[in-house]
Amino acid sequence: MTTINYTNAAVYNHRVQDFEANHYIVVDTETGKIVATGTGFVDAGVQVDETIDMEGKYVMPGIMNAHTHMTSVPTYWVNGGEDDEHGDSREFNTMYAIKNMEDAINNGVTYIRNVGAAYNIDIEIKKMQESGMIKGPKVMTSGRAFTMTGGHGSGSGIEVDGVEAMIHGVRTAMKKGVDNIKLMVTGGVLKNGETPDDIQFNEDEVAAAVTEAHHKGKTVAAHVQGAQGVKEAARAGVDTVEHAFNIDDETIQIFKEHGTVVVPTMNAMYAIYEYGEKTVPEWARNKVIVNIKKHFASIIKAAAAGVPIAMGTDAGTPYNGFESESAYEMQLYVDKAGMTPAQAIDTATINCARAMHIEQEYGEISIGKYADFIAMTEDPCEDIAVIQGEKDVYQNGVNVHRGIPQEKISKVTA
């Protein structure tokens, strides 16, 4: 066992919504977990083999992203569709997943929930990451997403119709090793011939999936955008609703009754709106134009009402990749959804961990948690945009990416 004492750090504490100066973090690099924390000097009884001075840097838990698609190509639309969005081979999808994983960890994302992967590739990628074969964040897997026949995501998903087919499909997915079940409950933006308001799974089908997943201690994430679909999914007991374009007072009450967490993916809409003209098909961009204002207003409403928000980007959609976009999503929560910088940090740390039911080991810097954290020279509570800059990244208590100081990135003004 080797223990490292990271000393002289300003450590983020979600309980006080701020960074606390002159803290130390002692890590057991064999387990990857934190064995001691405190202020000033380490207690005499704590074994320390190496001490590293953090020079007053601002240290927060590693970024967690609850909505990613690791096999997707976010630059697909840049060339007007000349590149293949998902590729037609397992090999292409696997290699792009490995690239996306490396981009994510180098930008401070230490844990992702993947909510839909062609060929169930995320299951094998998780094994490769855990064994040290590839570099990247830790992964919560979903395998292929569930969709109705011809529904949203049917190209790479599992098509099921009816309660019995749903039960069989979910049980089969769990047999293959998924950690989470992803359901396409409504239509969406990036499939022609449907709208975000289309109901694609009925409430009985969703409830059947939830029952089977929860029996095995698995979570359920629902792609759901229109108002009725959001209510249906929440009533059926899903753990998280993804996107949620239309939230009203009744929906807020349902969320509170069922403990539902919202994963906004605001940049998935914002990036298409800002950069997608003449590259993203008009039928897709028009759906963004119609829905973006009510989507952003819905997230403002949910956050103000105290509904838990967990950060997710929908990484892999147009102009929305695995680099600084996770930190930019947090900035959107401040600039467009009325959150404080500390609240935005919570969405990508403790809230994400709770949403994924892994808060016993992730989401904050405390004893017994994995030592996944990032370190910056500027205070994100003063300017959330600094998280988009270069930073030192630590996973299991070991530095995996060394940042180069640069000028902080200015906030969005649009």
Image: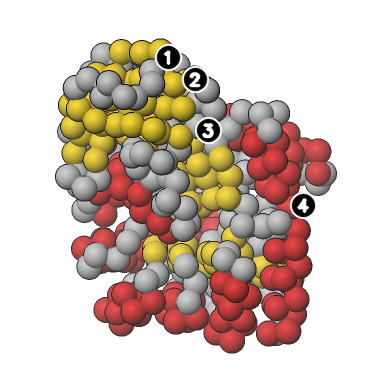
Residue found at the very far front of the displayed protein: 45
Q: Is residue 91 above or below residue 306?
A: above
Sequence-wise, the earlier of marks 2 and 4 is 2
How far apart are the two marked residues, 2 and 3, measured between alpha carbons? Answer: 10 Å
Question: Is residue 322 found left or right of 371 in the rendered image?
Answer: right
Question: Is residue 305 found left or right of 50 in the rendered image?
Answer: left
Q: Nearer the viewer, residue 109 or 276?
A: 109
How far apart are the two marked residues, 3 and 1, measured between alpha carbons? Answer: 15 Å
In the image, what residue occupies the spot 31% across and 75% down? 256
Report the residue marked by disc 2: 2
| Mark identifier at residue 31 | 3
| Mark identifier at residue 49 | 1
Quarter placement of the C terminus: top left
Sequence-wise, the earlier of marks 3 and 1 is 3
In the image, what residue occupies the spot 44% across and 62% down? 243
How far apart are the two marked residues, 4 and 1, measured between alpha carbons? Answer: 44 Å
Give the image location of residue 358, x and y in percent. Answer: 47, 53
Mark 1 secondary-structure assignment: loop
